[in-house]
Each structure stands twice: as structure tokens, then as C-alpha cells.
Image (cartoon, helix red, strand yellow):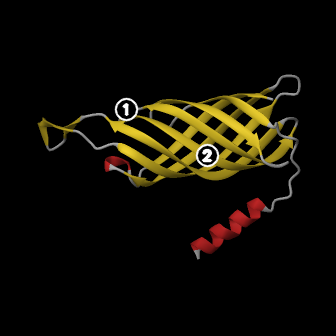
Amino acid sequence: MKITKLIAFALFLVTTTLSAQEIANHTIGLRLGDSDGFGAEISYQKSIGRYNRAELNFGYRDSREYDGIKGVLVFQWIHNIGGGLNWYYGFGGGVGNANFEARPDPSNSSNIIQPEGGLFILGAGDVGIEFNFDNLPLLISLDIRPEIGIVGYGDFDDRFDFDIGLGIRYQF
């Protein structure tokens, strides 16, 4: 029953007939943020249609538990709210590599645990809002990209991350 409701909701979002403004053919810039530490990503967007685009992000993460690199590709639908303000949603996936920090063993403080890191594959969703300036070729966005580990090594399989990012991109 839950899956039926989820599919119905997804179809509703996809078939929404809100009008959207023209989106830039290309944008490039930075996406800053993360749910656990600081991360910076180089972000590129390419329009695929009048209301769709692909977004590719590649970046570095520095958190309390691990350091790593990650690349994520997301397909998005864009809808106009008015006056240069848009909202968007999408889905995609990514791949990365993480190195975990050593930590004390909670059962015996004299022992050190070194969690396994390595390659991981993730699935991602994306929901956000953006502002397109009329007289400047800039796009500013705030989005939430929930990610879940699909395949991973050590402490990174089945990991959930609620990635929040602030983006600033140049449009051309």
C-alpha cells in the first residue's frame, strides 16, 4: 500500500503542469554544505529540455567521522514560482571513496578501532529552491539531497546522509 501511494505521488509530481521559465543551457559553480562536517563540490548543470536538466557534482567531504571524495549525478524537473524563483526536484546516484578516522573502542578505552572505508555507491533524491537573477548571470540555490548507500565497504554500506547544500553558479 505504501509503495502504491509513493508511485502515485511521484506520478503526480512528474505530470504537474506548472509553468516554468527558461532555464540556462549551462551553469557551473560551487555547492557548499553537508549534514556532518563541511563539503565543497564543483557543480555543473546542463539543460536537457525546457523544464529538465542534469546536475553533476564532484567534491570533497571533511567530517567528524570520515574524509572522502564523491561524485553525484541528478536528473531534475524545474518549476517556476514567479519572479525568477524556481523550485525543483529530482533523483540520481553517485559513487565515492571514504577514509574513516580511528576512534576509541567504547568497551575498552585502551583499544583503538579503525573502521573500514573504501568505495561506495549511493542513490540520491533532490529537492530545492533557486533564484535566477534577471540582470546577472547568477543562479543561487538551496537544496536537500537525501542519499543512501547502496553498495559500500566497511562502515559505509546502508549509510543514510541528509545532505544540505547552498549553491552559487554562473549561467552561460
CA–CA distance in space, label 2 to label 1: 25 Å
Q: Is residue 44 left or right of residue 156?
A: right
Across and down, in percent, residue 134 comes to 88, 27
Residue name at image x 86 percent, y 58 percent: 17
Q: Residues within 10 Å of mark 1 (few under 14, many from 20)?
A: few
151 w.r.t. 23: above or below: below
Across and down, in percent, residue 49 comes to 82, 49
Q: Hey, what amino acid is under mark 1?
A: Arg
The answer to which of marks 2 and 1 sits earlier in the sequence is 1
Give the residue furthest to the top. Answer: 136
Q: Is mark 2 on a helix, strand or loop?
A: strand
Q: Hey, what amino acid is under mark 2?
A: Leu
Quadrant where the C terminus sits is top right
**Which residue is label 1 attached to?**
64
**Which residue is label 2 attached to?**
73
150 w.r.t. 137: above or below: below
Q: Is mark 1 on a helix, strand or loop?
A: loop
Across and down, in percent, residue 27 comes to 74, 32
Residue name at image x 66 percent, y 31 percent: 167
Image quadrant where residue 150 sits: bottom left
Residue name at image x 47 percent, y 51 percent: 121
Across and down, in percent, residue 78 comes to 78, 47
| Dot 2 and dot 1 residues touching (CB under 8 Å) | no
Image quadrant where residue 42 sits: top right
Q: Is residue 112 left or right of residue 101?
A: left
